[in-house]
Image (cartoon, rainbow, N blue to C red):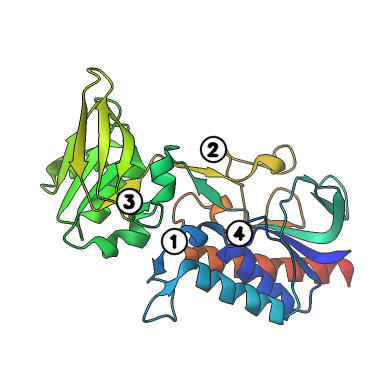
Amino acid sequence: MYDVIIIGSGPAGLTAAIYAGRAKLETLVVAGMTSGGQLMLTGEVENFPGFPEAILGPELMDKMRKQAERFGAKFLFQEATAVDFSSKPFQVEVGSQIFEAKSVIIATGASAKWLGLESEARLRGRGVSSCATCDAPFFREKKVVVIGGGDTALDDALTLTKFAREVTLIHRRSELRATKILQDRAFDNKKISFVWDSIVEEVLGKNKVEGIRVRNVKTGEESEIAADAVFVAIGHKPNTDIFKGQIELDNNGYIVVKDETKTSVEGIFAAGDVRDPRYRQAITAAGSGCKAALDAAKYIEEHYS
């Protein structure tokens, strides 16, 4: 029986583990097969406070994990496969094992949707990114490509114009899906050009992005576009499949919370990108992990003291 089980090991989960451990709660982190969340796919992190010279994403996650371990948090590097929040104590299944807890913090994050190309996966972190806010400063005065046609894509394109010399937006249709105000801003920005009715067939480059090969879906014609970076902005999917039917989710699968971290089941809390489709930053995830741990500690004190 644990005081708290934390599912997920990105910035939200690890910060929650640090705070839970310091509160003397018996804490288990179900970290997943690949711990560390999306920052494990990130190169240099320049916007996390405390690192003036920047820090590699995996190194930052390693430091946070060691800090949590110092305060007594235990780690299980396997995937949670099912949960039962219908009665107390709560149950979390990990393969053939079942763990019980007085409270649970869900910090499973959200995964960027990718194109599914081998070249895209190979060059991820080497010019292929899903976070313009994180990586735009690395491409000052460079040529970059954004793939997508919704709000995320146009937000990314506009963000990139503050740094890049040239931004090309690739969209598979002839019209954008983004809100009108974002479309107006993008069309008015002289740094942004558009390639319509096209999909990316390959990201070019051996050790870094050098361009893309696109195919026009109407004519079948293929062409190459030189670029120093490719930003994939076709959306995110919250990692909430195992929580369906257990807690309230919104229409897009994100966990619905009230008072910052509280889910529809008392004693179950949520932190990070799994409940936040808006900001999706390491620092905001860490902040909500802190809040979730403090709320879990208060819940345990009120119900189990």
Q: Which residue is mark 2?
A: 252
Tell me residue 5's x, y (percent). Answer: 76, 61
Is residue 275 or residue 98 the one in the foreground? 98
Which-is-in-front pick, marks 2 and 1?
1
Q: Position of 163 compared to 296: left or right? A: left
Secondary structure at numbered mark 4: loop
Mark 3 or 2 closer to N-term? 3
Which-is-in-front pick, marks 3 and 4?
3
Q: Which mark is residue 206?
A: 3
Q: Which residue is mark 4?
A: 271
Inter-mark Cα distance, 1 to 4: 20 Å
Inter-mark Cα distance, 3 to 1: 18 Å
How many C-alpha atoms fall within 10 Å of the one at disc 4: few (<14), some, or many (≥20)? many
Q: Amino acid at mark 2?
A: Asn
Mark 4 or 2 closer to N-term? 2
Tell me residue 30's x, y (percent). Answer: 72, 59
How many C-alpha atoms fall within 10 Å of the one at disc 1: few (<14), some, or many (≥20)? many
Identify the image quadrant of residue 295: bottom right
Q: Which residue is mark 1?
A: 42
